[in-house]
Image (cartoon, rainbow, N blue to C red):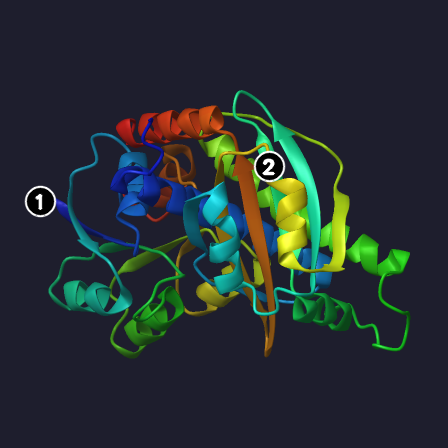
Amino acid sequence: MSNLQLTDDQREALQEVTNIGMGQAGAALAALLDTFVTLSVPRIQLVQVAELGKSLRAMVRDAQDVTAVRQSFQSDISGEAIVIYGPEGCKELWDLMGYEPSDEPPGTSTERELLFDVANVLVGACVCSVFELLGRSLSFSRPTLIGEKVPLDYLLQQETLPWGMALLVEVNFSLENRQFTAHLVTLMAEDSIEQMKAALDHFVANL
Amino acid sequence: MALPVLVVDDSPMARKMLIKALPPGWDIEISQAGNGIEALEQYRAGKAAVMFLDLTMPDMDGYEVLAQLRKEDLNTFVIVVSADIQPEAQERVRKLGAIAFVKKPVSADKLVPILKEFGIYE
């Protein structure tokens, strides 16, 4: 069996290129929400898809009520990026945009647009800039909704079957005195993970 | 005499990336620090005529380092090197006395004009 764990160098390199990607996502989000965004260092974790549920349940506070948006990406490294919002994440976004809870019931097109916009910003800036630093340019599909206020387990059953490994990135943004948390999950097949590891090795060797 | 240059970042990989982006042939002596507290210690020990400073760090971030340097004598050229590229971050660090703000990933192309402008590199 191939060794799919990251070496220390690979992990550090991935952490740093993810930090750079998050910085770009933060700037784009700040422009979208018109506020100053405080970035925390994103936590990254590479896990077997079979273990993904356990890792995600440890990060997502209310696993019975999540909303998720996905986008697939393609180059010689391809996969699927999923942004998961907990119930608070959706509420906080709604509030940050200056809407009142009573303005529109959840599940309307305005709320969906917002979830798509934020997912697009996160995936675009983060995944794109990571792979750009690794010398790849990716093409993305349009974001689609894969579940709205559904249990996490349901989501995972639908989405993870064809994939071998998942790269988990926990993204935390605070906005002045408010918090907004979302989770970015990147699913990749084993051969893409191998390609990514080779790209990371190449990156480190050139430093 | 070699110019003492301090590279401050919590990520060893980020420090390597920055050191690689320094212009070739620049006569310098490089020291490194992994957080703000170490950075100030090295600064006080005379290791930082020029300081490349990250903003997001545990144990004293870049903003706090700048504020503390100001309380002392700010006898160093601080160039902030950051993944956080919001205009407000750039404005904040300039107000705190940094001479420049460089977006990660850094390259010699981005650094050389700044170093020349301040007469740090010919």
Secondary structure category for the residue under label 2: loop
Q: Are the two marked residues, 1 and 2, in contact with CB atoms closer than 8 angstroms?
A: no
Q: Is residue B73 above or below residue A70?
A: below
Q: Residue furthest top?
A: A76
| Cα–Cα span, label 1 and label 2 | 62 Å
> Camera-side residue: B31 or A191?
A191
Using the image as rendered, state which of residue A19 and residue B74 is in the foreground: A19
Residue beneath label 1, please?
B1
Work out whether residue A50 or residue A108 is closer to the camera in this orientation and state it.
Answer: A50
Q: Which mark is residue A161?
A: 2
Q: Quadrant of the N terminus of chain A?
A: top left
Q: Position of residue B89 (x, y in %)?
A: 52, 62
- At x 30%, y 27%, the residue is A206
Give the amino acid type for the residue marked by disc 1 in the picture. Met
Badge 2 crowding class, 10 Å Cα cut-off, few under 14, some 14 to 19, many 20 or more, is: few
In the picture, measured across the screen, residue A16 lies left or right of residue B95, that is left
- Residue occupying the point 57% across, 57% down: B86
* Residue reaching furthest to the left: B1
Question: Is the residue at mark 1 from the same chain as the one at mark 2?
Answer: no
Query: What chain is tagged by disc 1?
Result: B
The location of residue B26, given as percent across then percent down, is 21, 36
Q: Position of residue A89 (x, y in %)?
A: 67, 66
Whether A204 is drawn above or below A54: the answer is above
Q: Residues within 10 Å of mark 1 (few under 14, many from 20)?
A: few
Q: Is residue A21 left or right of residue A121?
A: left
Q: Secondary structure at mark 1?
A: loop
Mark 2: which amino acid?
A: Leu
Quarter of the image holding residue A106?
Answer: bottom right
* Image quarter of the C terminus of chain A: top left
Residue A171: in sight, yes or no?
A: yes
Q: Position of residue A22 (x, y in %)?
A: 52, 51
